Structures are given as structure tokens and as C-alpha cells.
Amino acid sequence: MKKLITLFSSLLIFSILSIAQQPVKLILDTDIALDVDDAGALAMLHRLQSLGECEILGIVVSSGSRSYDGYWGAACVDAIDSYYNRGDIPLGIYKGCHNIPDRVSNFSKQVADAFPHDLPNGAYAPEAWKLYRKILSEQADNSVVVVTVGFLNNLAALLKSGPDEYSAMTGIELVRKKVKFWSCMGGQFPQGNEEFNLNTYAHDAAYVMEQWPVKVIYGGFEVGWQVMTGGGFEKIYPPGTNPVAMAFKLYTGGADRYSWDEISAYVAVRGTANYFDVVRGTNRMEVYDPQVLGERVHSRNVWTDDPGGKDYYLVLKADPEDLAAELEKLMYAAPE
Ligand SMILES: [Ca+2]
């Protein structure tokens, strides 16, 4: 009997360990091209996948496919994925009207031109919300982590979607069933003030934040702003040898950059325990439409503490330099 109990205990410990070691299955939603922390986050996720800690199921771009930044942003993602020997990661893109009319990026086309990739440009990628539906429908219940480090236009389209060839569920039902939590770089806490990711498609952000059915962890502007990373790339990689190093060199001139996107990607995989406290409550958007033709939308996110809320925001409890060192160790690792 004692032997039997020992056997059962060993099996139990073994299965607990197996569950603990399952890689986090995630979808990255990025406005890469507009800032370089998206590229840093992608480099970091590739390293975490090499360590067996995550599996990137798909990547979607939230800059429109008919804009310069979406067109080249998608090719830039494919070039970075290919550098890490994962050029077959499915890519999707936002195909609606792009809210930023001007060309912003100074690195996406350059990286795409310099490094090999299969996807010619964003016009060849499928609709992001369709790819979300396909991926979510194929995954186990309560297993997928969504990381957004750009706009919420793709998630709005997903939540508004109805049954299709991939699933009989609506978008909201699919998210409720398949998504474990959403790690969102967006907003400012406890008081918001036109944070870029939420404000660019403010009505979509308001809709998603209200309708999203499961847990959200927000990484606010004020968190990433304290943590500087990326300047070390050029000390490790000679010019032309690493696409993310090239992106940083073009964007910052070789200096560090704020780590907004890296932090939300990190939390998606390793959680909050080591570096953060969290505050629980409800986050919502207030959107002010312009009264004059040509003026832009104004918005802010509004936080309410609530012990039963589905939302959380990060508070950095560690020394920012310790977190920066942790992120950089992952970002600077060579492909496997
Ligand atoms: Ca971003």
C-alpha cells in the first residue's frame, strides 16, 4: 500500500511538473514599424520559445495593410521571424482604414530589404481577425494568451465577428472559451491620458475594453517608461547581422529605448510575480469625438479599483535596472 501511495505521489508530482513546463501558447498583436520596442518584444519572445517557455501561434499587425507602416511592418515581422528560423509563423494584418495617414517607420522597410523573408509585404497577409479565429478554434480551452503591443482594431474585429468556417462560435464566445488572459500594453494608471495604443483607434479600444470577457493585465505607459533597453544590441552584433539590432540602430541611433512592449510580452510568458505588483479593478475608455473637421479624437482610460474586476494593472516593484537586465538577456540572445 505504501508503495502504491509513493507511486501515486510520484505520478502526481510528475503531472504537476509537466503542466508547469507546458509552453505558453500566445498570439502577438503588434504595430511594429511605429516604435522599435515591438521589435525588441519579438526578439524576446523568440528567445523564450527557444527556452521552451512559449510557443508563438501567430502574429498580427495592427497598422493597416494599405499604409506604408503596415505594408512594410508585416514584411519586417517575417524577416525577424525568419532570422530566428521561424519564418513559418502565421501572419495576419489589419485591412481596414489606417488611422495614421503618414509614413512613420524609419526601420521596417530597411529591415525587410536587408534580411530574407517569404511574405513580400502586408498586402499578402490575411485579415488579422480571421487568423485569430482560425488559431483560437484549433486550441484547447482556456489555453491561449493574447499579447497586444499596438492598437486594438484587430481585437475589435475579432470580438464583432460571427460564426464562420473555423468556428460556430461568435468572436466573444471564442475568446471566452479559448483565451486564458490578455496582456495589453496600453493606457496609463491610475489616470489615463491619451496613451498612443488606446487612443489611435479609441472607439475600438473602448469597445474591446468593455466587451472583453476574460482577465486582462494592462502594462501602462508609466511602467515601460522607467525601463530602458536595446542600446546593447550594437555592441554585440556587427551591422547587418541581426534585424532587431538594425531596427534599434535606425530608430534610436544605438541608444536605449523605453520597454513598453517588452514588458507586456514578458508578463504574458513569465507572469507578474518576480518584478510586479498588480492592482485589480475595471478599466474603461472615455472618448471625445472632435467637433471641428480635421481635429483628432481625444480619449483617456479611467480606472476604478474593484476586488471583483477582470482587469489588473502592473506596478513595478523591482529596481528598473534589474528588470532591464532581465529583458536584455532575452532580447540579445542569438537564434538557436
Ligand atoms: Ca508597439
Image: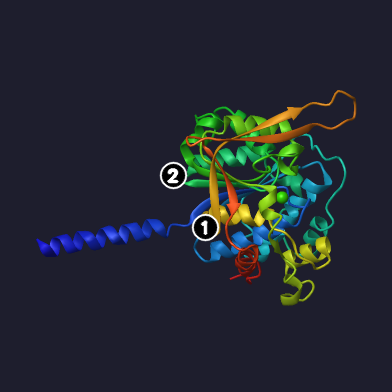
User: Would you name the residue on which mark 2 appears?
Assistant: 140
Spot occupied by residue 50 in the image (x, y as percentages of width and height): 54, 66
Identify the image quadrant of residue 4: bottom left
Label 2 SS: loop
Label 1 SS: helix
* Above or below 162: residue 155: below
Seen as rendered, the residue at the extreme top is 291
Spot occupied by residue 39 in the image (x, y as percentages of width and height): 71, 58
Mark 2 vs mark 1: in front: 1
Spot occupied by residue 154 in the image (x, y as percentages of width and height): 66, 38
Hey, what amino acid is under mark 1?
Arg
Q: Earlier in the sequence, mark 2 or mark 1?
A: 2
Residue lying at 49% horizontally and 54% vertically, measured from the top left: 24
User: Would you name the residue on which mark 1 appears?
Assistant: 270
Q: Is residue 302 left or right of residue 169?
A: right
Residue lying at 78% horizontally and 61% vertically, measured from the top left: 111
Q: Nearest the camera: 59 or 307?
A: 307
